[in-house]
């Protein structure tokens, strides 16, 4: 297994780093054409099209649209039936995700000016949100918790989950997680047809205002296509982990932390940065030793070979510069004084401080969301949070005196822009 | 002039309202092909391509890329040269926009749990932001203030403005507004080539992290295309105003308020809702009387004829239902008790309360942003604000005891998902 080695002293270090971390989302014309056809069919033919595609892609035998819904009692049944240890773990994770999310809630505010004019911002939840959950292998109950709980904390009255059940296969943990998270309705549909049904509504599936949750390229393409009609969350790229280590953490721990993201995907990107070159060797040796035992060794090895890197830097300040360039989804600061290093970090989705804070804790139950910006987008975007399910309205209430004063200013500016109806509308309030 | 009339008692009221307010963003294949070519050329050939396109589209004679930059002294010169009344109006508007924006600033937070584990959210500004400002007729200094000031309040260190100067034509008010708003650098470039230069950087134009600001279909298409590489703001549809009036405001005021958005664009959508049918007649008569005097009468008449409506409802509660369905960009509550009606409003970009609060005051100087969600997207999105120039990173610092406890839960959940590297990474911290 060959992991790329870089050193910040290499003359071509920065361009090489840029090439290593570049990721251009795949967009395939054939996929787009198929998705366009599916979205159009569901938009125009509703449930009939939804039943057709679900029969075709998920080998479903359902013939009545009403039977696509999974009733709440079925979710409760799954919750009762799973192993107690799993139920308790899901409940503990949910409680911690909820508790963290409560801190994110935005509140309305207003202030009054001397002349009685009131300005403010009114914060309201979205009316109805759709949550896409992949079926089959990639069905993750943790993802249900991470997407659903912030929406419910925001106060979204109706949360509608869709999950494909290919060949009738249902993931009991996913249904149990939906019960714990307070999902309101669940439909056994998936793919672009489920996204279209949520965006446009059918007789059976209610139209939502925003669609969140991960999915394959058909789902991602459909989400991009319906954006505008509804809101969407980010389209995620492959998982990434960047570990900055001073060389004093157990190399096995660091190797396993790198594996934990590598096992997601052959395109996942695990990177380790250290000012201690010998430590990079020790982690490489640990990785080689640990790999054969891993259940997902082939995926991990592909990720390490294709996209990983061990980066030698002069000091931790330089490590912070590299981290800020990469703006990683997950950043572990496995160093003696992580607080000091944190102050130098400007761009990252989630930051894990200290040798004990394994990134995997954040994936499940630390509390913060595991839906995070990837592919350097942490330069300008944020983790999924309660704020993604709330929106703001500006509030302006002018007193007569305030309107007269503002009207004079607005009139000058509107006339400067040649917008005289604006000016005259304002001027009525100066005289009025 | 014929303005559509609707009544909530019509049996086909809701579907008719939906058709009236539907707006599907134009996407033209020919435009997309042209833009793709321009973006690719600027990305690969940099300044050389930028100079070529600027010469071709803006009839520029500039041959050295460095000469595309408009120096700060030129902005100060514009500020000194404009009429004092305009300078004062811009400064007053800027001060109010800044003061409102200060209220929007997000702060970092953290909390400590019983076992010493610390969870939090770190808020940081974007490093560098690009601001697109249209040239020619549609050059609005108010738009410079509204886009630039929130970015500077957020703490963005470098704000780069681009503005085309077709045939060398420069708008002095736009340059003066840039000086007032604290824009750091200005380039005389526009169109898709300017968006591409900001997204990918050239030798002369620095690469930014997010691009905001209005533009024509080429600019909008380019922004969609570079999204992912950089962040973008919303792609705006035509302006909208929805006035709810109890029938007791001067009909001339309401007619002019409707005109103030109609004059933007033949596709702009002005709508009036009232429980008083006779008042709708009076506003229609006022509009017919006032129209011939308007400087932009032709545009206003086209907007009123194509997309406006006068809607009769049973009472104000029903007016609120209609407003929530439309989720208008601008909502005027021109009624006796606007506060009571406000409590029933869930979806709107900006809400203007009371008879004196003309929407036009908000366009220029009330303080809240005039960049607002259009085309029913206020159901899920918010006005442009300081928060659009800040992003969050989750912060997790586990004490050894906290990591051990969380590790047990994470291990159960990771094994439930078949992700054993996650489980083992967590388990090291249980034993560690």
Image (cartoon, coloured by chain):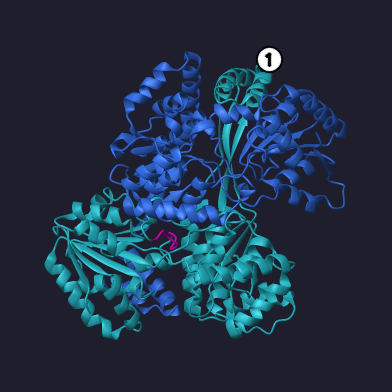
Chain colours: A cyan, B blue
Could you tell me residue A26's position as x and y percent?
A: 44, 67
Residue A156 in sight in this render: yes
Chain at numbered mark 1: A
Report the side of A253 relative to B89 (left or right). Answer: left
Secondary structure mostly taken by the magenta-highlighted segment of the chain? loop
Could you tell me residue A176's position as x and y percent?
A: 56, 74
Residue drawn at (40%, 72%) of the image:
B410
Q: Give the range drawn in magenta.
A: A368-374
Residue B120 in sight in this render: no
Relative to A310, residue B212 above or below: above
Report the side of B420 relative to A234 (left or right). Answer: left
| Outermost residue to the left | A278
Could you tell me residue A405's position as x and y percent?
A: 59, 18
Could you tell me residue B32's position as x and y percent?
A: 51, 55
Residue carrying label 1: A431
Q: In which quarter of the image is residue A350?
A: bottom left
Is residue B147 or residue B70 the one in the foreground?
B70
């Amino acid at each position: 297994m060959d992991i790329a080695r870089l050193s910040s002293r290499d003359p071509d270090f920065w361009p090489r780093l840029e090439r290593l971390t570049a990721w251009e989302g795949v967009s395939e014309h054939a996929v787009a054409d198929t998705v366009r056809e599916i979205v159009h069919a569901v938009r125009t033919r509703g449930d009939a099209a939804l039943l057709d595609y679900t029969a075709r892609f998920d080998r479903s035998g359902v013939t009545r649209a009403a039977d696509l819904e999974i009733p709440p009692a079925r979710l409760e049944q799954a919750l009762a039936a799973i192993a107690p240890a799993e139920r308790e773990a899901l409940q503990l994770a949910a409680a911690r995700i909820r508790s963290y999310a409560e801190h994110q809630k935005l509140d309305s505010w207003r202030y009054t000016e001397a002349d009685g004019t009131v300005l403010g911002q009114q914060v309201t939840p979205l009316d109805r949100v759709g949550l896409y959950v992949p079926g089959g292998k990639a069905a993750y109950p943790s993802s249900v918790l991470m997407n659903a709980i912030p929406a419910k904390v925001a106060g979204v009255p109706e949360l509608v989950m869709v999950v494909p059940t290919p060949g009738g296969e249902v993931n009991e943990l996913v249904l149990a997680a939906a019960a714990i998270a307070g999902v309101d309705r669940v439909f056994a549909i998936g793919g672009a047809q489920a996204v279209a049904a949520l965006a446009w509504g059918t007789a059976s599936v209610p139209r939502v205002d925003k669609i969140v949750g991960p999915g394959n390229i058909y789902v991602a393409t459909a989400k991009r296509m319906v954006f505008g009609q509804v809101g969407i969350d980010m389209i995620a790229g492959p998982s990434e982990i960047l570990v900055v280590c001073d060389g004093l953490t157990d190399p096995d721990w660091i190797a396993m932390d790198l594996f934990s993201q590598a096992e997601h995907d052959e395109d996942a990107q695990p990177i380790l940065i250290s000012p201690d070159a010998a430590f990079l060797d020790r982690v490489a040796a640990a990785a080689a030793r640990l790999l054969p035992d891993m259940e997902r060794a082939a995926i991990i090895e592909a990720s390490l070979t294709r996209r990983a890197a061990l980066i030698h830097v002069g000091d931790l300040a330089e490590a912070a510069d590299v981290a800020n360039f990469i703006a990683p989804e997950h950043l572990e600061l496995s160093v003696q004084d992580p607080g000091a290093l944190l102050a130098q970090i400007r761009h990252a989705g989630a930051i894990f401080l200290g040798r004990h804070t394994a990134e995997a804790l954040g994936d499940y139950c630390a509390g913060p969301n595991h839906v995070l910006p990837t592919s350097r987008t942490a330069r300008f975007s944020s983790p999924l949070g309660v704020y993604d399910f709330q929106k703001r309205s500006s509030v302006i209430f002018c007193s007569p005196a305030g309107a007269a004063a503002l009207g004079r200013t607005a009139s000058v500016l509107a006339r400067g822009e040649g917008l005289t109806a604006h000016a005259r509308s304002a001027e009525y309030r100066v005289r009025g």
